[in-house]
């Protein structure tokens, strides 16, 4: 073999595999000096080629190992800087996943090439530029910008009632940062909120901003990523994954609706973007500003304890009133939409005003059932009924996506007596059109917004007054600002209270408060009509008076008694398998191994119990809950113990989630 003319450099590469180690490769002479930390490379791994991430360099090879060469470079310049690599290392320890898996999650899917930024236009009504700040807004602005100027590693909770002007505080603070030559990151929870949020930011800051969301192409994401890294883009707005965009001189991170569960990634590596934003703010020397009308109880308790600044916006600007809330007791009633809500919609229609109606269930009916024998159309893969969708005349599983035509006669008894039970957004859309003639209803849910521009099209129609009622699932309840909306109606307000989740009351109160806050934001007073079968639940007392703090204190007291967050910490381990017997045995083994690895005086192990969805995509599922604070070392030991225990259990999948927000 001909000797090489110069030494071969070596790099440590993290691969996106569930293996807690790095792999060393040689850099071919042609690439020497061109591969840096944070760059992607294609490497051989067994018979496969895998894209990995360079995280270090070596002077000598590990003893006794025959090294392979890097095949090719994906990036001429590293996509991840030193701070992001440090955050990836922290995430790997905190969430107990390999560094390669974390790095893969940090980079936008399909990022490649140069790409071009697309200038998106909107038709939302303009609003006054630079309105006079209310005293509470001014105080919040002064405290946040003071911390920015002093380069303090500070965190703040901006707790303001709905319509109190939190977004204006964000805009003023970001404007101050841009004046100083810094950049800003804004995280929002839902793609549905992006069009209107983006419109307000574009009017204020022009071409300096970019919007990152899941419906962009790979080259478009690449253009934003590289534009931010190069300093051309100085404000990025986006959902969860935008927390990793490599902005230059990052001075403020804003998380709007910080309580939203969508900030927690349900696929591994199960990171919480709000937590990651806090870590990044620390490393960047930036200010973290969390905003909400209904903060998560964890954030609220932390702020009240003094772990972060607490900024309170107590009222709406210019003396605007909070809407009056009416609770309608639906017990004993047969109608889907109460007469009170129908009358209110008729009044709104006559006055030329607008309304929002919330029902957190898409589809036409919850399920299809035989009136004679009681048979229900269920998903063959998941332990849930199929939802009937009138458009397309199809039964669909909202978890695995399977679809089929509804039977004309019962598969069980043969009777021709199939009926639709329950109610979804499609059914309510038809009901409202029939009950209030001439009412123009637009439906906004996962079905109606699919495809590019689906959210923007619907929201622009409503903003321009082309529709009278915006009907939808929870995506209509948060963040929207329409001055002509004078009525909000909520159907089945108590549906979320029936979930076996200690956060059920908190989530229901939050959703109802957010929905109520969509009305009365203009010159006219707002009205909210809430239909429920559980009017005696304590949350409605606090809802009527817009008393988040009263609700929070009562709920926190219950959490303290039970040892649930924020008074304690929880970890969730889930096993799944196609055999019910196999998963039952695996669950028992898992529970015993976790209990053996922990001090029973400090920790509690509950389970195994059937998951909320006991069968999902053809697999049976059991869960084990661990109660008690775990540091990174303890988390790693628990996962290792669980893996060892289930090593011989064939066909069993193991999943873990620390500080989970969902239990499905």
Image: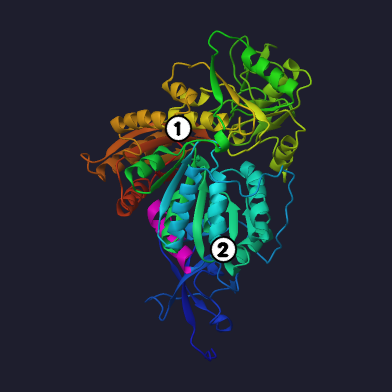
Query: Residue 253: x and y, percent?
Result: 50, 55
Q: Tell me the element at label 2.
A: helix
Which residue is tagged 1? 580
The answer to whether residue 91 is magenta is yes
User: Is residue 287 something one can see in this rendering?
Assistant: yes
Left or right position of 554 against 482: left
Q: Which of marks 2 and 1 is in front?
A: 2
Tag 1: Cα neighbours inside 10 Å, few (<14), some, or many (≥20)?
some
Return the disc, 2 or 1, that comes first in the chain's sequence: 2
Tag 2: Cα neighbours inside 10 Å, few (<14), some, or many (≥20)?
few
What colour scheme does the image use? rainbow
- Indicate whether 570 appears above or below 232: above
Give the magenta range: 82-99
Q: Using the image as rendered, state which of residue 445 and residue 208 is in the foreground.
A: 208
The answer to whether residue 264 is magenta is no
Query: Residue 353: x and y, percent?
Result: 71, 27
């Amino acid at each position: 073999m001909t000797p090489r003319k110069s030494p071969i450099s070596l790099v440590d590469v993290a691969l996106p595999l569930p293996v807690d180690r790095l792999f060393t490769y040689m850099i071919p002479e042609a690439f020497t000096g061109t591969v840096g930390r944070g760059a992607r490379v294609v490497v051989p791994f067994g018979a496969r080629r895998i894209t990995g991430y360079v995280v270090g360099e070596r002077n000598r090879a590990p003893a006794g190992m025959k090294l392979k060469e890097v095949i090719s470079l994906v990036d001429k310049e590293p996509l991840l800087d030193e701070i992001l690599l440090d955050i990836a290392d922290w995430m790997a320890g905190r969430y107990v996943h390999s560094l390669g898996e974390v790095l893969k999650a940090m980079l936008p899917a399909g990022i490649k090439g140069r790409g071009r930024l697309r200038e998106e236009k909107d038709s939302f009504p303009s609003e006054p530029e630079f309105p006079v700040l209310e005293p509470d807004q001014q105080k919040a602005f002064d405290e946040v910008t003071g911390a920015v100027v002093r380069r303090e590693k500070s965190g703040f909770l901006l707790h303001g009632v709905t319509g109190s002007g939190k977004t204006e505080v964000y805009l003023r603070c970001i404007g101050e940062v841009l004046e100083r030559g810094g950049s800003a990151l804004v995280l929002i929870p839902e793609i549905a909120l992006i069009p209107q949020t983006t419109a307000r930011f574009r009017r204020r800051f022009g071409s300096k901003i970019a919007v990152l969301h899941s419906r962009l192409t790979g080259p478009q994401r690449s253009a934003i990523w590289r534009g931010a890294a190069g300093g051309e883009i100085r404000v990025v707005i986006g959902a969860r994954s935008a927390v990793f965009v490599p902005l230059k001189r990052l001075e403020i991170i804003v998380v709007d609706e910080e309580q939203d569960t969508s900030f927690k990634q349900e696929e591994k590596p199960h990171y919480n973007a709000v937590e990651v934003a806090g870590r990044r703010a620390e490393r960047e020397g930036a200010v973290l500003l969390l905003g909400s009308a209904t903060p998560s109880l964890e954030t609220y308790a932390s702020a009240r304890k003094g772990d972060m600044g607490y900024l309170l916006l107590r009222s709406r600007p210019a003396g605007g009133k909070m809407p009056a809330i009416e609770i309608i007791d639906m017990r004993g009633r047969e109608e889907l939409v109460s007469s009170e809500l129908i009358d209110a919609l008729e009044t709104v229609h006559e006055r030329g005003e607008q309304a929002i109606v919330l029902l957190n269930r898409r589809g036409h009916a919850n399920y299809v059932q035989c009136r004679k024998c009681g048979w229900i159309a269920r998903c063959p893969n998941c332990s849930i009924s199929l939802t009937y969708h009138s458009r397309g005349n199809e039964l669909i599983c909202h978890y695995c996506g399977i679809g089929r035509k509804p039977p004309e006669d019962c598969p069980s008894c043969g009777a021709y007596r199939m009926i639709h039970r329950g109610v979804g957004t499609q059914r309510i859309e038809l009901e409202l059109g029939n009950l209030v003639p001439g009412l123009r209803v637009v439906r906004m849910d996962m079905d109606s917004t699919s495809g590019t521009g689906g959210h923007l099209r619907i929201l622009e129609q409503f903003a321009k007054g082309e529709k009278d009622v915006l009907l939808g699932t929870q995506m209509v309840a948060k963040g929207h600002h329409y001055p002509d909306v004078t009525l909000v109606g909520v159907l089945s307000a108590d549906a979320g209270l029936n979930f076996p989740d200690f956060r059920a009351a908190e989530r229901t109160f939050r959703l109802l408060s957010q929905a109520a806050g969509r009305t009365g934001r203009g010159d006219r007073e707002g009205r909210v009509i809430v239909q429920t079968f559980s009017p005696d639940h304590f949350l409605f007392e606090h809802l009527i008076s817009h008393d988040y703090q009263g609700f929070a204190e009562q709920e926190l007291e219950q959490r303290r008694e039970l040892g649930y967050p924020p008074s304690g910490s929880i970890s969730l381990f889930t096993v799944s398998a196609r055999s019910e017997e196999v998963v039952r045995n695996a669950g028992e083994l898992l529970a015993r191994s976790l209990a053996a690895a922990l001090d029973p005086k400090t920790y509690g192990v509950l389970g195994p119990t059937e998951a909320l969805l006991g069968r999902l995509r053809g697999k049976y599922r059991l869960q084990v809950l661990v109660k008690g604070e775990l540091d990174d070392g303890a988390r790693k030991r628990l996962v290792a113990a669980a893996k060892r225990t289930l090593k011989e259990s064939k066909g069993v999948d193991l999943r873990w989630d620390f500080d989970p927000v969902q239990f499905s």
